[in-house]
């Protein structure tokens, strides 16, 4: 996929594989809780 061919820049969750999401959740668990960050499914 070439970003310049897309009509708009994809949302950040588009770049998260399940493995990367798990690593981010683990590493930033306190921040996610503190700021109530939600991970959106790729279908959004």
Image (spheres, helix red, strand yellow):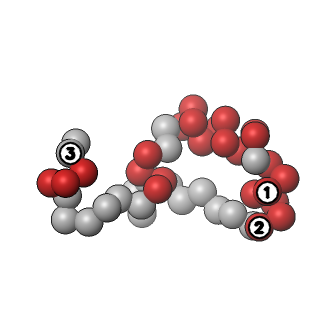
Side of 23 where 14 appears, left or right? left
User: What label does residue 2 carry, if any?
Assistant: 3
Comes first in the chain, label 3 or label 2: 3
Mark pair 2, 1: CA separation: 6 Å
Instruction: Please report contact status of discs 2 and 1: CB closer than 8 Å, yes or no.
Output: yes
Instruction: Please report contact status of discs 3 and 1: CB closer than 8 Å, yes or no.
Output: no
Taking the spot 19% from the left edge, 54% from the top edge, the residue there is: 4
Q: Position of residue 41 (x, y in %)?
A: 50, 55
Few, some or many C-alpha atoms within 10 Å of disc 3 (few <14, some 14-19, many ≥20)?
Answer: few
Few, some or many C-alpha atoms within 10 Å of disc 2 (few <14, some 14-19, many ≥20)?
Answer: few
Q: Which residue is mark 2?
A: 35
Taking the spot 75% from the left edge, 39% from the top edge, the residue there is: 26
Q: Quadrant of the N terminus?
A: top left
Comes first in the chain, label 3 or label 1: 3
User: What label does residue 31 carry, if any?
Assistant: 1
Q: Secondary structure at mark 2?
A: helix
Q: Secondary structure at mark 1?
A: helix
Q: Is residue 40 above or below residue 18?
A: below
Q: Position of residue 31 (x, y in %)?
A: 79, 57
Side of 3 where 11 appears, left or right? right
Q: Quadrant of residue 38?
A: bottom right
Mark pair 3, 1: CA separation: 32 Å
Taking the spot 42% from the left edge, 61% from the top edge, the residue there is: 11
Q: Secondary structure at mark 3?
A: loop
């Amino acid at each position: 996929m070439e970003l310049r061919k897309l009509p708009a820049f994809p949302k950040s969750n588009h770049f998260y594989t399940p493995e990367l999401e798990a690593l981010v959740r683990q590493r930033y668990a306190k921040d996610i809780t503190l700021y109530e960050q939600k991970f959106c499914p790729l279908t959004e």
